[in-house]
Image (cartoon, rainbow, N blue to C red):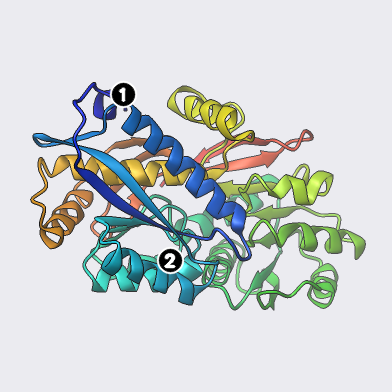
Amino acid sequence: MAAVFFSSFSWSAETLKVGFDIPLTGDIPQVGESSKYAAEMLKEQINGAGGVKVGDKTYQLEFIYEDNESKAESATAAALKLITQDQVLAVIGPQASKQAVPAGEICNSFKTPMITPWSTNPQTTLDRPYVFRACFLDPFQGPVAANFATKEFGAKKAAVLYDIASDYPKGLAEYFKAAFEKIHGAGSVVAFETFTTKDRDFSAQLTNIVKSDADVLFLPQYYDEVPLVVKQARELGWKKPIMGSDSWGSAELMKLCGEACHGYFFSTHYAAAGAQGATKEFIDQYQSKYGYVPDDVAALTWDATRLLLQAVQNTNGLTGDLEKDRDAVKDQLGQIKDFEGITGKMTFTPEGDPIKCAVIVKISDKGEFEFFESVCP
């Protein structure tokens, strides 16, 4: 990374404008905060070292942040503003699939490169040549969780609780169910319970889950909902494992859940505890600057932004014609291979999806997200 970005270049008045379509308010503001903090840290480092050399020019980075309020309609409006008014070269985000899927349609329609750091739903990039992601997909994550529950817990029957109105949990719940029943047979997911966004009482669904005699509960929900479900499940007598997904990975989870989440596992993109090399350097710097350990959203935003800058550099020169430059960056993103991200090595498929490993994390008795194992395609 030092070789790519931190050489001592002469300063130039030229700027690279990048838009960030992130949830700074709404249901998951911690996701937006993590995204912005990681981006600002990277921008300060690169600009402080002189900028980004592209061909024979050096550029300073200009990041423009738009709040999508954790809403689909706001995410599309933010993308439209960034593309048409701010005239950014590319867009980072949105993070959650509920916003990334519709925003991806806008970016693709306007032929503007978009990289979502955290959206694992296949629809985000499907048939959209201008849309990429820095994370694995749910068709991979669902089987990872199903296989782990089978192996680690000896589970033969599973229950699932998910928000049917949100793209991410709905899709992942279905992929988990298909994978688990492929292993254990039709009907082995003995409870497949749903709720709707903003619901806070899950007692009816959890009563059915407890009665189902499932061996494990799969809960692919966001960090603000997990503590409510976990605590209500315990109150109703659930004493078996609860397994989560990458949406658990926020630094805010343990503040909200505390000891109730100790000992649980979730699939995600990287593990902060025990990290080494460039990943540890990122974690240490982020923690020193912002006062807490960066979550997977921060790490993926860092990787997504660096992927974009790598593609920009690989054009070997920008023309100043925004339409042509967006096309050139899109073309170079599609050709990236063996990119060394802090969340793992990435090579893009023709669909704009990276081939990369998943990590299983265990929440320790200290409330830390500890690496348990890696699962690769």
* Viewer-side residue, 313 vs 86: 86
The percent coordinates of residue 179 (x first, y second) are 54, 63
The 10 Å Cα crowd at callout 2, few under 14, some 14 to 19, many 20 or more, is: many
Image label count: 2
Disc 2 element? helix
The percent coordinates of residue 116 (x first, y second) are 40, 57
Residue drawn at 55 percent across, 26 percent down: 284
Can you tell which quarter of the image residue 3 is in? top left
The quadrant of the rendering that contains the N terminus is top left
Instruction: Using residue 126 as the reference point, say whether residue 188 is left or right of it.
Output: right
- Residue 248, compared with residue 340, is above or below; it is below
Mark pair 1, 2: CA separation: 31 Å
- Residue 243, compared with residue 72, is above or below; it is above
Query: Mark 1 = which residue?
Result: 2
Residue drawn at 50 percent across, 23 percent down: 276
* Viewer-side residue, 121 vs 98: 98
Query: Mark 2 = which residue?
Result: 100
The percent coordinates of residue 155 (x first, y second) are 70, 55
